[in-house]
Image (cartoon, rainbow, N blue to C red):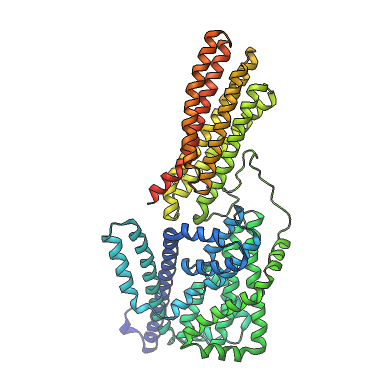
Amino acid sequence: MNMDSLSGVERKIRRESYMSASVLLTMAGGLGLFLFGMRVMSDSIEKVAGAKLRHILEIFTTNRFTGMVVGVIFTAIIQSSSACTAMVVSFVNAGLMNLFQAAGVIFGANIGTTVTSQLVSFNLSAYAPVILLAGVLCMMFVKNDKVKKFSEIVIGFGVLFLGLSTMSSAMAAMKSEPAVVNLLASVEGHHLFATLMGLVLTSVIQSSSVTVSIVLLLANQDLLSLPITLYIILGCNIGACSTALLASLAGKKEAKRTALIHFWFNVIGTLLIYVILFFAEEPVIHMIQKISADNGRFVANAHTLIKIFQVIVLFPFSNLIVKLACLCVPGEDKKVGYRESYQLKYIGDKVVFNPATAVVEVIKELDRMASLASENLNRAMNALITLDEEDIEEVYEVEKNINFLNHAITDYLVKINQSTLPIEDLKSIGALFHVVNDIERIGDHAENVADCARQRKEDGSSFSKEAQKEMGEMLEMVNKIVQYAIEMFVKSEYKHMQDVVELEDHVDEMEREFQKAHVERLSKGECTPAAGMLFSDVISGLERVSDHATNIAFAIMDAEKEAS
């Protein structure tokens, strides 16, 4: 059937249906571009600046106020309160931050997330093609890796505003669609429904910034009245908690509590605004209109002011919100000590994964593994002298745990190496692979000493007093190197680098002198050949332990060379 054979009414209906479908497709395409641009921009910023921002979080979150300020800045930069909250959860899990400090950062993140709507309200869509072209040209023709990463941010920014421009055009066409106008008009006056709509949309899209931006565009086209936008924004605020709540479900109790701090802040804050709007809706709208040039600016300013007001009112009660979160998730997780067998403490399935803190958590796990290996070496050396069977058996059991951690951490490093880590962290992955291997080798040498203890127990050989003294001196020196190396690696400090180099030279010299003295004792008949063989093996093993410890100390230099 062709259009000529249709009546005028039928042609009109078909034309309108075609136009409606076209508008919806344009709207969907614009939303897709906006979401993609937001994701690219946020991920690229995390890759470029994630490590530096993480260091800022570590340093300036010692109290709630500075934590709040950092939360504002951090979220404003990466354009995602969800990413900030996820990083805070990781910090709490790693023991780098407590819940009270986390509360300050989360409060600040709620203000920082409003920056997106402020940017959208300034209507930079006209410059989107130029921004996008600049980013693509940099990506194609500039060889510098850092510039390429920065160009990804620019491309994301351009795509974001291109999507906004597309959505805005679609919404302008919607004004002539009676079905759309009637649907949006049906929300007017139904405050609870508007709040639920904002909550559901944000939970689905997983970003309050995106939902508020859509509300902003609808208000700009007069498709939504100003009063109803306030209630949709309140719903968006609660819906924004869904990302952290869902992510925390598989996490530990501290992760759940951190997500609940975010949730309760938004719920209580929303109820406060509801009460204010119930008694003074018109004065509030009038006040925001006075500082807003148009409807879009009204929505952006309303979003920001609501968040600032909530933080000002609830900040003094942050301790109570933390306690409320703890009441909702009572009890404690099973403690995983550094000697706990076949369990990961800082990484794995029960920890909320966040690329920006993944390397920090690996380092914490490696610190735990190194403590196990160092303690096991000393246990083995003690068993070599005392021949305590329980100590010998425990050396073997702990070595199995060290092997488990070696495989689990290595697998995790492979996994995170394939994710979007910050550039600095990505370049340190190679050094981390070497460190986990060196720690595992220290554990192997402890097991070798236990083998010597068992052999000595079986053949009844004994060490001379001089041999025992030499092994003790060398072990003390090796313990210092291991302690300094692990401290340097964990803290990324060079403070003991010279000490490590000098101690390593001293241990090498010791090994040569003690092997020579051992040969002299053998020639004089002061020790048996069986004991002499064990002594030689132990001394050589301790020297190799110092080599592995030195490798760990120098790993931070290798990582920085890669990053530079």
Q: Where is residue 227 in the image (x, y as percent from the top left)?
A: 57, 87
Q: Which residue is drawn at 65% across and 22% down?
A: 385
Q: Please tell me which residue is depicted at 56% across the width and 18% down the height of the picture.
A: 534
Question: Residue 37 at x, y = what percent?
Answer: 41, 68
Nearer-the-camera pick, 502 or 370: 502
In this rendering, would 36 be left or right of 267? left
Residue 437, visible in the rendered structure: no
Q: Nearer the viewer, residue 562 or 189?
A: 562
Residue 18 lies, in percent from the top left, at 38, 79
Q: Is residue 12 above or below residue 460?
A: below
Residue at position x 67%, y 27% from top?
A: 391
When the figure is inspected, residue 87 is found, relative to residue 282, above or below; the finding is above
Q: Residue furthest left?
A: 141
**Residue 42 % position (x, y):** 45, 64
Residue 447 occupies quadrant: top right
Quadrant of the image for the N terminus? bottom left
| Vertical placement of residue 148 versus 393, above or below | below
Residue at 50% over, 29% down = 507
